[in-house]
Image (tube, rainbow, N blue to C red):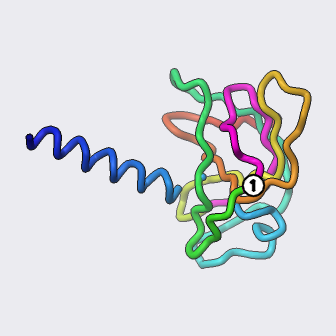
Amino acid sequence: FSDTFRYVDFVQIFQLYISKIGCASSKAATAGPTSGTTNEMTTQETYKLQHPQTCSGMFWRADPRPNASTNKKGGDDWPRNGALLKGVAHDVGGTKYLCVDSWKQNGSDTWITDCEGLWMLFAQGGPVLHKV
């Protein structure tokens, strides 16, 4: 029973963690940091997603900034390896994220634009986003 209980606790904690980490739109992102722990670059750049381990892609993260909106738009699917992501880089509490404005799934010719609330980590067990 105790091992099962610990597993259930772990799953619930992990789900809560994941829900707190994946972007307000770039308009909001470039309006300025919401706290002293945010440092942002103001130039939009394009990155190719390639997870360094056996994962086939990566789930979106929530806006990591304090008191950020939880609204999401344009991220019904998650980007697979080879997807292209355009956005503005942010350093939040020492962790680098990309606030995604638009993205194109690997193998697709269509860009998903006007995205909101979609954030991606630059690294997870190694580099994830590679500048194009």
The image quadrant of residue 114 is bottom right
What residue is drawn where x is 77% and y is 61%?
Answer: 41
**In the rendered structure, which amino acid carries the disc numbered 1?**
Lys
Depth check: give the residue in front, 95 or 87: 87
Occupied quadrant, residue 48: top right
Rendered location of residue 26, percent (x, y): 81, 62
Nearest the eye: 113 or 52:
113
Q: Is residue 21 above or below residue 127?
A: below
Q: Is residue 46 left or right of residue 16?
A: right
Check disc 1 and report the residue beneath it: 73
Question: How far across and down, in percent of the image, does residue 19 sit?
Answer: 50, 55
Residues 14 and 52: in front is: 14
Q: Is residue 69 above or below residue 121?
A: below
Residue at the extreme bottom of the image, as rendered:
35
Which residue ends up furthest to the left in the rendered image? 1
State the residue at coordinates (33%, 45%).
11
Quarter of the image that includes the N terminus: top left
Q: Residue at x 76, y 31 (%)?
A: 83
Give the magenta-colored segment's residue range: 73-91
Q: Position of residue 36 (x, y in %)?
A: 60, 78
Is label 1 in a helix, a strand or a loop? loop
- Magenta segment includes 72: no
Picture residue at 67% right of the left edge, 67% below the top:
39
Q: Is residue 93 above or below residue 7?
A: below
Q: Residues within 10 Å of mark 1 (few under 14, many from 20)?
A: some
